[in-house]
Amino acid sequence: MSVPEQLPTPAEHLLAPATIDAGLALDAVADTPVPAEPILRLSHAGTEFVVLGTAHVSKASADAVSRLLQDESFDAVAVELCSHRAQALRDPDAMARMDLLRVLREGRAGIVAASLALSAYQRRLAAQVGIDPGAEMRVALEGADARGVQSWLIDRDIGITLRRTRAAVGFWQRMALTGGLIASVLEDSEVDPAEIEKLKQGDLLHSTFGEFARRSPALYEALIAERDRYMAARLREEAARTGAKRVLAVVGAGHLEGIARELVGESRAPAQVLAEVNAEPPPSHVAHWIGMAILALVLFGFVWAFMQGKSVGIDVVLIWVAYTAVAGALGALAAGAHPLSIIASAIASPITPFHPALSSGMVSGATELWLRRPSVGDFTALKEDLGTIKGWWRNRVARVFLTFVLSNLGTSLGVWIAGARMAARLASHDGGPE
């Protein structure tokens, strides 16, 4: 799918309610129960899909869902949620049952930290408009339960979306995205009204990374277009499985056109589409070989240094240990970690770059978790604490993830600095015995 030169504007999203039968031409419908919200009515394989475009921090969107459920009858209600996000919405205490040590051990801490950062940004937006994040999704799920109809979770897991997005872009774009997430956490002022308007055009990921997506076909594909295809395929799959004749689908307004296009234009079986866009991204061979090359150069530097003399070899080893240890420790220190967690990061940082399945953040994060085990109160206060800079450092759950992320970041910087210093030390050697 090609990427448009520019994402749809607000005016393009505020479509009149319409019906799509066999193409993308829209036939205006005279009456609508919720004229303020964009609605598309689509017929596919004997099922009518009423697709409501919402803003995830808009009270009007929640009201629109409620009115549609009251005024019309549906066999099923589909929502733009994955199972993890739906559980968090239905069960606010689910986070308290998370096995943080397992998250660290399985290497999922980075994804969870990114999800928490996105959640914090969404809550800041929601606080300004006076509504809980995802209220329209909660209304849709509760309305389906109250009427005894099925509810379908049609969005792709956010972890897979973030991993596929990360794999789709280059190093510098990846750094820009990471920087944007960090900035969304550190920024404590009110969100610009223009940003809130952007959110009303799409969903959280769409609004947060929309500027990048405009300039990057790969990012647009992974973050937006793939999810359009995924949600349309899920709607077709569930309709065929259940025989539902009328379905209300509640999605971010930014996905309306893409879902409509995929519903009427995709001829492949839903399972084939889902397998394609839901697969884990293959490992980056370029990143892998770059990492291996760096480590090979470091090891070669050690060997070459000792060949020049014992003192040169010792100097090079000390440079590596000192710079990586100090950088890793500073990362943990910046996270407000326990002194022993800082020491653990310093000890692990010179070693973990040589171990593909281990990182200094895993070691320091696990140490922090062991030393400062989060209480029930930390989990209860997590949502509120994520909304402020101080809260990230005060809350023990958030601080475990900060320790993981910043320790790894520090170690990565330390590797580059140490490598440069090692090269300088070897270059300064005149070749004579030492």
Image: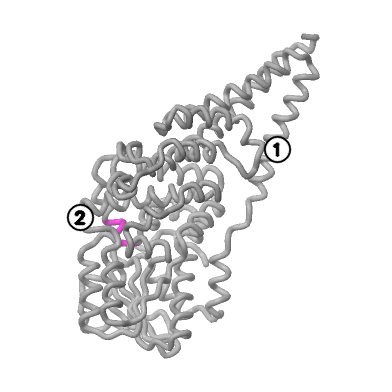
Residue 299 magenta-highlighted: no
Colour setup of the view: one colour
Q: Which residue is mark 1?
A: 293
C-alpha distance separating marks 1 and 2: 50 Å
Residue at image position (39%, 71%) is 257
Question: Going by the image, does 121 lie left or right of 401?
Answer: left
Residue at image position (46%, 44%) is 178
Q: Nearer the viewer, residue 329 or 189?
A: 329
Q: Would you identify the image quadrant in which residue 55 lies?
A: bottom left
Residue at image position (30%, 77%) is 144
Magenta highlight range: 197-202
Q: Which residue is mark 2?
A: 129
Residue at image position (42%, 65%) is 82
In x, y percent, where is residue 223?
Answer: 46, 59
Name the amino acid, label 2: Val
Q: Nearer the viewer, residue 68 or 17?
A: 68
Mark with earlier residue (1, 2):
2
In x, y percent, where is residue 218?
Answer: 53, 56
Name above or below for residue 75 compared with residue 423.
below
Name above or below for residue 363 compared with residue 98.
above
Q: Mark 1: which secondary structure? A: helix
Q: Would you identify the image quadrant in which residue 390 lies?
A: top left
Name above or below for residue 182 compared with residue 165.
above
Report crowding for label 2: few under 14, some 14 to 19, many 20 or more residues within 10 A (C-alpha).
Answer: few
